[in-house]
Image (cartoon, rainbow, N blue to C red):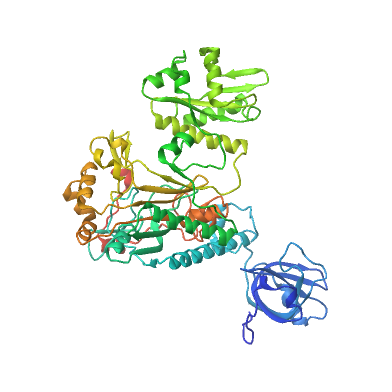
Amino acid sequence: MDNMTGLKRTHYCGALRSENIAEEVTVCGWVAKQRDLGSLIFIDLRDRTGIVQLAFDENTDKAIFNKAFSARNEFVLMAKGVVKERSSKNPDLPTGDIEIDVKDLRVLSKSETPPFDIVENCKTGENTRLKYRYLDLRRPDLQSNILFRHKVTKITRDYFDENGFIEIETPMLIKSTPEGARDFLVPSRIHNGSFYALPQSPQLYKQLSMVAGFDRYMQIARCFRDEDLRADRQPEFTQIDLEMSFVDMEDVLSIGEGYMARIFKDTLGIDIPLPLPRLTYKEAMERYGSDKPDTRFGMEIFDLTEEVKNCEFSVFTSAISGGGSVRGVTAKNAVNVYTRKEVDKLTEFVKGIGAKGLAWIRLTDDGIASSFAKFMTEDEMNAILKKAGAEKGDVVFIIADTKNNSVLSTLGAVRCEAAKKLDIIGDGFNLLWIVEFPFFDWDEETQQFVAMHHPFTAPLDECLDYLETDKGAVRAKAYDLVLNGIELSSGSIRITDSDLQGRIFKLLGLSEEEAHQKFGYLLDAFKFGPPPHGGMGIGLDRLIMQLLKAESLRDVIAFPKVQNASEPMTECPSPVDGIQLTELGIQLLDIKEAE
């Protein structure tokens, strides 16, 4: 193996261009490909900036030529030579007009044959690639994603610094507090029998920063939630966290909008029109069946309750008499895609998410085909089609239920499922705010109202008079930022009035003693002049995933977890030895036996 003595890298591989011709350069990297043509050898040398071609011919020193002949994929090389014009140019490569005529070649380390090809869009299974993630990360497409992420975080810090925010780090080992998900717990050796929690967010600490007078806080914060994974969720994630004093909701939204405009402009060259559109929670649910609607396509929900309230179809009338509704969506020009077989598949889909069934109308060349037409008069069917805006070639999907939320959420899922099937989802970026969330959420299991947000979220001023008398009508000073059907951000204006906070705790079933046990340090701090404040947290991983149109968060995180929250590369989580457990005062139980 050679060393680097006497050589120093002068250029990155992907930085060389025609203007560098005749320059003497030194580059370093990994062998992406070696091509042996007998008297000619070419090596594609790769680093994080790209690939450059190294050339060796009959004029090359014999010892150097032999090193090139022996080089294999993923060997680490250092090459010194003169940049020259390529005789056979490669227009698909940024460095495709030039190559390096090598005068000195060092083999810095050798490599075994990798378990998969280090190429873009590698077809090897993800589990294998994640087991060798350090090799997977050599792939140009993944390296590009991680470099893009670096750019976004730099722009983020610049933007918030320019707007007067102070970056403050908050602790990783904190007191366990209820925040909506299960905590990751860390046992304390010193305080035997007690536990730290890893933060689900820096929520309480950033509010304490406002009490401390820092006025504008931000942090690119690591957060942890012990919950099941999916494509846009990881057990540990990164949040762009911010909090502002002496502000109202408009101030926070303005900062958030400015940030999104800056990110899109500086990374993708896209101008985002401001102000961003807004929908109330009620409008979003009634039009799109979701509090994070994808507005890149239409297919909005319509209400058929009035049109069918007197019909003979008991599925509709029983839903209405039970206090529910009948609503639908229209899939335009969908009759050839949504054959009877495909409609049956969609019916099974809605049953799988909790609906009782799916009513439908197909407007074919031969007339109307419907799952319920025999129960309807001609006038009733025409009224439905008019309300649905349905014409020949369209398909109408209808859901009925005694619970309006079930009707809306099911149609929201149908709307998205059908749009994917029909391939009508636009390719742009649709950002919008959802505002005026309900303050309380009805829990079917416990049959009582629970907090939809953390307990320091402020209700709208006009709702204060009926906090105790009409919980279902109370709305919050809470807001979400949505991008293409993905929730990017959530935030609120906080309660700082102790009397109001006491009312909220009481309504949530928290006694004064329980509240102080869980949040005592924040409540104590609020006795010493808390400023009005509010903020939000923006999911950095999700934002980058959307900007890059990546399929999974794992494509934009360097070392992610897989579906069961494990990491194949390091094989964590893993057992620890008995000595460590004894020091912590922990004895393991067999869960199955315990149950």
Quarter of the image where the N terminus is located: bottom right
The answer to which quarter of the image holds residue 255 is bottom left
State the count of labels: 0
Which residue corresponds to the image point at 40% horizontal and 60% vertical from the top-left? Answer: 222
Residue 122 appears left or right of 151:
right
**Camera-side residue: 532 or 56?**
532
Which residue corresponds to the image point at 54% horizontal and 61% vertical from the top-left? Answer: 133
**Most distant residue in the bottom direction:** 6
Which residue corresponds to the image point at 42% horizontal and 48% vertical from the top-left? Answer: 480
Residue 61: x %, y % from top left: 77, 83
**Most distant residue in the left direction:** 513
**Camera-side residue: 219 or 165?**
165
**Camera-side residue: 147 or 433?**
433
Q: Report whether residue 560 is seen.
A: no
The answer to which quarter of the image holds residue 29 is bottom right
Residue 277: x %, y % from top left: 49, 46
Residue 556: x %, y % from top left: 53, 57
